[in-house]
Amino acid sequence: MKTYLLVFFLLVSTYLLGQSIKRIDGTQYSADSLNAKIENLMKSANVTGVAVSVFNNNKAIFSKTYGLANVPENIPLEQSSVLYAASFAKTVFAYIAMQFIQEKLIDLDKPLVEYLNKPLPDYIINGFRRGYHDLKTDKRYEKITARMCLTHTTGFPNWRWFEADKKLKIKFDPGTRYAYSGEGLYLLQFVMEQITGKDYETISQERVFKPLRMENTSQIWQTKFNDKIAYGHNVKGEPYELMKWKEASSGGSMSTTFEDFTKFYSALINGRGIDKRFFREMTSQQISIKSRRQFGPLAQIDGTENDEIQLGYGFGVGTFFTPFGRAFFKEGHDDGWGHYSICFPDKKIAVVIMTNNDNGESIFKELLEYSIGDKFTPWQWQNYIPYNYIPPPVTNLIKLTPKDLDQYIGTYSSKELPIKIKITRIALNLIAEATGQVAFALQAVEKDQFSYETEGIVLVFNQQENTMILKQSGKIYTFRRE
């Protein structure tokens, strides 16, 4: 095991030895036991750095960082380390948008084009893949409202650069279905900038960062951050290249410290900055979600897995219901980063988790259950696969040896789908794990052919051509082993 996983740093922390922490089910435990739990999870899952804040009565009674901000340089992760917030930035944007709505600067259901001085496609917007000229022949953009942007129902893809042609398009009628979209939030950001005549960084500083004294948070990279950088790391503890954003994006350009984000989250759950009615509306279900996964191919397929918790979306945050009341959550994800926050407002209990490692999300399920008693977060929908998860075995229809199965092992990619499929083996089962999906055991049905009946998947391998054919829902995709 790497040396960096054997040493954990007690840094700037907020908790008292012996402090009692309360879970949503009323049980209590000591802060010391949570500290030990986090350290054990980091060792078990090979996670380089973790930061955790637990809220009781809407106050952060436990706030601590662990591990390293920079593994090769052996630099500890501190409360003042500058982290990439990823999609935690969207929570800040939703909070600001609710202020605009509260102040009647924007109406939730008024088409956004009505706030503009000329047709949306006619605006020339400088920056990384910006602008709306691709929509000129699709007038459905004229129907898009702030409500649709905040509930991820615009019909836009997550980001245009994930599309095969790199163009922005409307993939379904606005307002009819949930599909996570940073593009949708950026459209609302653009309109808010036009209304105020201010850029989004200025808006963020005036409405959030300065009032809450978040002195080390910005939507664009600041030179003062250079001395306190926390890097995202891969599973081997190798740092990814740092992205220093020059453009403010509501979808995820924000850099922050754990200390600063804890300040913001405290303000949010206590309803500071927005009235009680608007906070309730923001964090309550506005649309139901039926998709089997949040991302990947199963995001387009509906199921009933999350009907019991009534999974849905509010304004900028996900929502669901439990025996302990409603909950709202928000994630953050990118290469090297995995973050999660969830609040049970009826219980005034919440937790914020930030990690700087590709393995970070693998501890979320266990950490949520231990820290606040959250056994309801839809971890499969969010692809938070536990580090110790083993897919249930299946019985092969033909006899195969480990040597037979090992010839299929590898990582396969396709030009037709923006995912990779990793094939491994456990005992006498091939295991498939696709981007954005839970790993599952494949059943050998005939030579070179395997299936996963639950999802209607068939995989056909061709060893000579080094390819794998994926068949699902009447569609066929070709993957090639890397």
Image: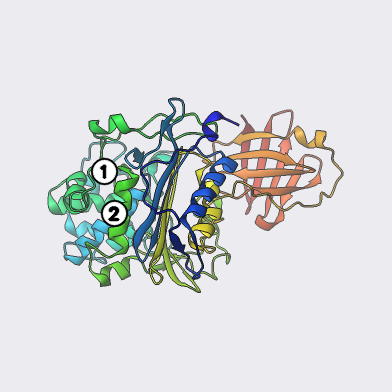
Q: Nearer the viewer, residue 175 or 327?
A: 327
User: Circle 2 sits in a helix, a strand or a loop, which is it?
Assistant: helix
User: Percent position (x, y) of residue 41?
Assistant: 56, 46
User: Circle 1 sits in a helix, a strand or a loop, which is it?
Assistant: loop
Q: Quadrant of residue 95?
A: bottom left
Q: Nearer the viewer, residue 308 or 470?
A: 308
CB contact under 8 Å: marks 1 and 2: yes
Q: Can residue 7 be seen here? A: yes
Check disc 1: other Cα within 10 Å, few if <14, some if 14-19, many if 20+.
many
User: Percent position (x, y) of residue 155?
Assistant: 39, 56
Q: How is the image coloured?
A: rainbow
| Residue that sits furthest to the top in the current view | 73
Query: Residue 264 — which label?
Result: 2
**Which residue type does callout 1 highlight?**
Thr
**Which residue type does callout 2 highlight?**
Phe
| Residue that sits furthest to the right in the current view | 399
Q: Can residue 119 be seen here? A: no
**Which tag, 1 or 2, sits closer to the chain's start?**
1
| Above/below status of 211 relative to 226 | below
Quadrant (top left/top right/bottom left/bottom right) for the C terminus: top right
Along the horizontal axis of the image, is 441 left or right of 142?
right
Q: Disc count in the image? A: 2
Along the horizontal axis of the image, is 143 left or right of 52?
left
Residue hosting label 1: 217
User: Percent position (x, y) of residue 15?
Assistant: 39, 53
Determine the CA span between mark 1 and mark 2. 10 Å
Q: Nearer the viewer, residue 160 or 223?
A: 223
| Above/below status of 58 relative to 202 | below
Q: Measuring 36% from the left and 45% from the top, which residue is drawn there?
A: 168
User: Percent position (x, y) of residue 383?
Assistant: 54, 51
